[in-house]
Image (cartoon, rainbow, N blue to C red):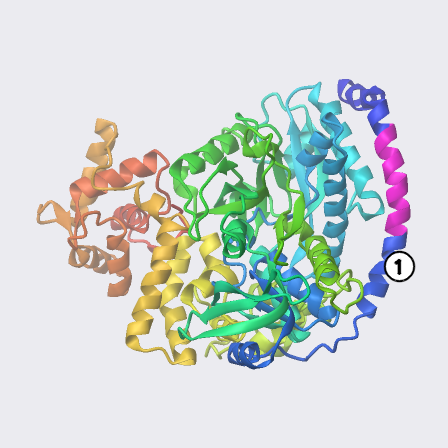
Amino acid sequence: MAFQKAVKGTALIGGGAIATVFGLSQFSQYRNKHGAFVHVQAAEAVTVPLKNDFPTREQQILALKTAGEFDVLVIGGGATGCGCALDAVTRGLKTALLERDDFSSGTSSRSTKLIHGGVRYLQKAIMKLDFEQYKMVKEALEERANLLEIAPHLSAPLPIMLPVYKWWQLPYYWFGIKLYDMVAGSQCLKSSYVLSKSRALELFPMLRKDELVGAIVYYDGQHNDARMNLAIALTAARYGAATANYTEVLRLLKRTDPASGKERVCGVRCRDVLTGQEFDVKAKCVINATGPFTDSVRKMDDEEVPNICQPSAGVHIVMPGYYSPDNMGLLDPATSDGRVIFFLPWEKMTIAGTTDSPTDVTSHPIPTEEDINFILNEVRNYLSVDVEVRRGDVLAAWSGIRPLVTDPNSKDTQSISRNHVVTISESGLITIAGGKWTTYRAMAQDTIDAAVQEHNLKAGSSKTIGLQLQGAEDWSPTLYIRLVQDYGLESEVAQHLAATYGDKAFEVAKIAQVTGKRWPIVGKRLVSEFPYIEAEVVYGIKEYARTAVDMISRRTRLAFLNVQAAEEALPRIVDIMARELSWSEQKKKEEFEAAKKFLYFEMGYKVKSEQLTDSSEISLMPSDIERYKKRFHMFDKDKKGFITILDVQRVLESISVQIAENTLHDILNEVDLNKNGQVELNEFLQLMSAIQKGHVSGSRLAVLMKTAEENLRQRGVISVDRSGGGL
């Protein structure tokens, strides 16, 4: 009864605000209905032919060198830059795009994976009567609907639960979420709803039940960000844009305008990072869409120009899928320091984040232990005491740099809006800065509109509303069944391919290797617990992947899901890429080391190694120490004080179990802290102490020794599959 009264009482709150939003929403309803008509018109109005396939990277580089002057040259291969290239080329403009690293190698691959309007921005808009914030949310919700439509294979609606622990919060949050629905208007994905305590726990059983009043569920979108970025780039290439990754802009080219006598930007000097060759690319208009590096490109134009971006770091962590339901996210609207934390299922894992703190601009942002622990502590506040939130369950961690637009009156980055700005320098350089992933298309439209006007380019209006991206045309939710039936792929692998490549999944299936097994017929996995197959490495090269890092982080998402699995897959990935790209042995070694360095610093492996070191404290009860010593001495029969591969093999042979020597070497190496080829008693006790404290989980040696101890008594079967334990 109290629950119902609290919800009904909401109708009495904020009448003026509701009236205001309702009025705005009525206007939006008209715009939405008109927009639906525009949706069809825009995509159908594209007169530029769409090629069946996209050119090779070598062909793209040749086009950049020989195609003469371009109408538009975009610097930056993130979501916004690729969006600008797609918008320009579909208007009939001769378009080029240069990216010094890989497509989506920066912020665009390191997001929360949400396609959303921004609940917290709407809250600020209402509380501060900020119409600009309202317009930003409104625009983002419109773009959310469009993005879900043009790439349905890469995106989907996701219900997100907002748990409520105080009665007064129920009407407050219900009111805010309903406003969110109202602002979306006819493009609301699904209407939000209220849950009782029992129903909330039924849908999210991991939730902390103490003092839980109920919950509110609303809907936003979710996507595979790096693959979405790549789909935009590939679509632009198919429409004729000369797009090239690993092509660094060294400086801007300028000429003197005979009419005004002023210097005008007319192209760039660039370098093919892979070959070292330098060349010029001429263009009527140059667009700076470099995200956090916006100001560095602006200073190529004018060294005295003041900065317009204030970078902010956002850290995310990935945990095992059992931390969240398969299809229900969680929102913590007010963390201990006022931030917002999302807790979301993604790719059968769980993402938690994000933080928000000022940072320096770097190409290689690193997650810190402080940020990781902050997220873990916030997660603990919302999960049941039955769920032990362990530091060792962090499978991957990354930091992304948000290119926020500076507000000179701001005291911290939290009050900076994500509104985008388009600026034009005296020399004609156009810069697009700020914004958010969801609004990349609108940002691109505004940018190309400005380019057309400033440089008198002959082009019509934007054609990208409703324009389907690479893989979307013939995709359907049941496409994966055809992959299973026609090619003999595992169902999980087929679902993954359909959700990653859309209707292009058949091209991957066609080159998949025969397994030699009864089932699956084709599709050799890179690692056993993930559905990525070797054929994706070959296809990834066609999609412009040129490094092992490209493959583990953006063509596949292994590095973002489990750094240990990514490291395990590296040797095979490097071998396949070496065969396809004719790498030398030295090049193979360099790629392997570069990828390991990427995993170590940028994806959280470094903080993993710091959880168990040769200086780690042993904090075990005396009884536990005796128990673990007995277990250790079952392997160390000679009382040497350490165990080697031979010791482990001897015990396994005694219980009729065989494990490959290289696998045993890897298992011991995980715990061999001083890297002397053996595991000493002290190292084993440090491991068991770290496991008890939750700093380490899924240690194969710990599982093997415990199971062997039991099997020596029972003579049963031992399993040493990697358990997916985390950092």
| Mark 1 residue element | helix
* Coordinates of residue 287 in the picture (x, y in percent): 61, 60
Residue at numbered disc 1: 37
Instruction: Please tell me whether residue 719 is drawn above or below residue 50 in the rendered image.
Output: above
Q: In the image, is residue 488 above or below residue 336?
A: below
**Disc 1 marks which amino acid?**
Phe
The N terminus: image quadrant: top right
Q: Residue at x 25, y 57 (%)?
A: 655
Is residue 710 visible in the rendered image? The answer is yes
**Residue 438 position (above or below residue 354):** below
Q: How many marks?
A: 1
Q: Please say if 635 is above or below 263.
A: above
Can residue 478 be seen here? The reply is no
Q: Position of residue 491 (x, y in %)?
A: 59, 66
Residues 369 and 724: in front is: 369
Q: Quadrant of residue 258?
A: bottom right
Res. 205 image quadrant: top right
Residue 438 lies within the magenta run: no
Q: Is residue 50 left or right of residue 391?
A: right
Q: Main secondary structure of the magenta part?
A: helix
The residue positioned 62% from the left and 75% from the top of the image is 69
Q: Residue 275, how many percent across, how many down? A: 40, 75
Question: Depth check: 297 or 372 in front?
Answer: 297
- Front in this rendered view, residue 366 or 383: 366
Query: Considering the image in quadrants, where does the C terminus appear?
Result: top left
Give the image quarter of residue 71.
Answer: bottom right
**Is residue 30 rendered magenta in the image?**
yes
Identify the residue at horizontal 54%, vertical 53% (top origin). 298
Q: Is the residue marked by circle 1 packed among few (<14), some (14-19), or many (20+) residues within 10 Å?
A: few
* Image spot of residue 185 (x, y percent): 84, 43
Q: Which residues are magenta?
A: 19-33
